[in-house]
Amino acid sequence: MELWQQSLKQSLTDPADLAVRFGIDPAPLAPVAERYPMRITPHYLELIREAGDPIWRQCVPDPRELDDGGLSIDPLNEEALSPAAGIVHRYPDRVLFLVSGTCASYCRFCTRKRKVGCPSMRVSLGEVLAGIDYIARSPQVSDVILSGGDPLLMSDLLLEDILERLRRIPHVEVIRIGTRVPVTLPERITENLCRMLRRFHPLYLNTHFNHPRELAPEAAEACARLADAGIQLGNQTVLLKGVNDDPGVMAELVKGLLRIRVRPYYLHQMDLTAGTGHFRTPLECGVAIMRSLRGPVSGLAIPHYVVDLPGGKGKVPVGPNYVESETDRLEILSPGGERLIYPDIQD
């Protein structure tokens, strides 16, 4: 068993395990963990300083998750946009390929919290092969994004097999991997993994840092190994209330990302996912943060602030000139030019 697998095995999965260390009553958290699984790796646990801090909020169950707030369990309409096992085909030339059903740590704000880590998202080899077959039969697809769950929780051997099969498809030009393990399980980024990955260029990797404290030395070393293997690194941050909804925190994060050779790529407005309403901020919060970054922060470090529109309509950039419709709803232009109503919230 490799070191990263040992660490994963030692992860906390029961809120009761947090009681002694942080002096909390775990009873209110137990029903949440039964519905939406909890897993916190030893590395990520060490980043928590106190109950309720920005790291805690991202990984520890919260009773508010059981309040769906009238929101959808599948706000991006991924199930309807899935023409084959594990495939989400929203844009003509690229597909999301869900090859794993588990993550090293389960984010409490996850868009796919309805199934990630649950029995309903066990991914079989047959389903992976069916997804590859769909891509092979779709000549318009030139860009494949491996996601899940987390693709890097697969063994090197299985991941290598998937990458080899994709590389044999003539029309697949670019492969991307979406992973949070540099943040939550940095020991997974081994020299052997990087040596294998470098065989499949052009290969891009998008990771997911949300707070400056996650830029730990171990995470920096993991990103350095990937960058040294020639892998282009990007980061997708989610704007989260009580975590990074502050201009100073965001500036520290994006500047820190550049220092470890990770380019800030997206700042996501929270998806309208059931059980995540307590993380949502008003759109104006994100607009104000983006305004604060311009000038004091290098353009290299400034991400695109985007909303992933409900119903699978795609990502749109949000700036200071969005059209206000009512006090709690905003009009946004979709990629196709359609004027859509997006529900905002008030402070």
Image (tube, rainbow, N blue to C red):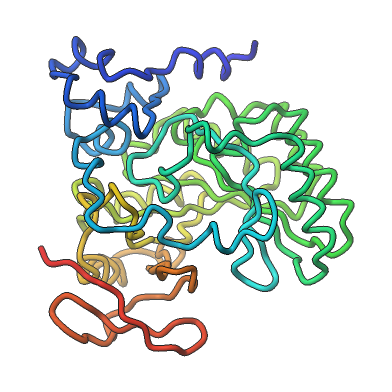
Residue 286 x/y as whole percent: 26, 66
Q: Nearer the viewer, residue 299 or 124?
A: 124
Instruction: Relative to 309, say whether 148 is above or below.
Output: above
Residue 193 x/y as whole percent: 70, 31
Q: Is residue 22 left or right of residue 134?
A: left
- Residue extending furthest toward the left: 347
Q: Residue at x 26, y 87 (%)?
A: 323
Residue 235 x/y as whole percent: 48, 52
Q: Where is residue 141, by image quadrant? A: bottom right
Which corner quadrant holds the N terminus? top right
Q: Residue at x 72, y 42 (%)?
A: 127
Q: Nearer the viewer, residue 337 or 43?
A: 337
Q: Where is residue 2, by image quadrant? A: top right
Q: Residue at x 67, y 73 (%)?
A: 92
Q: Nearer the viewer, residue 241 or 111?
A: 111
Q: Nearer the viewer, residue 47 or 253?
A: 47
Residue 145 x/y as whole percent: 64, 54
Q: How many marks?
A: 0
Q: Is residue 192 left or right of residue 82?
A: right
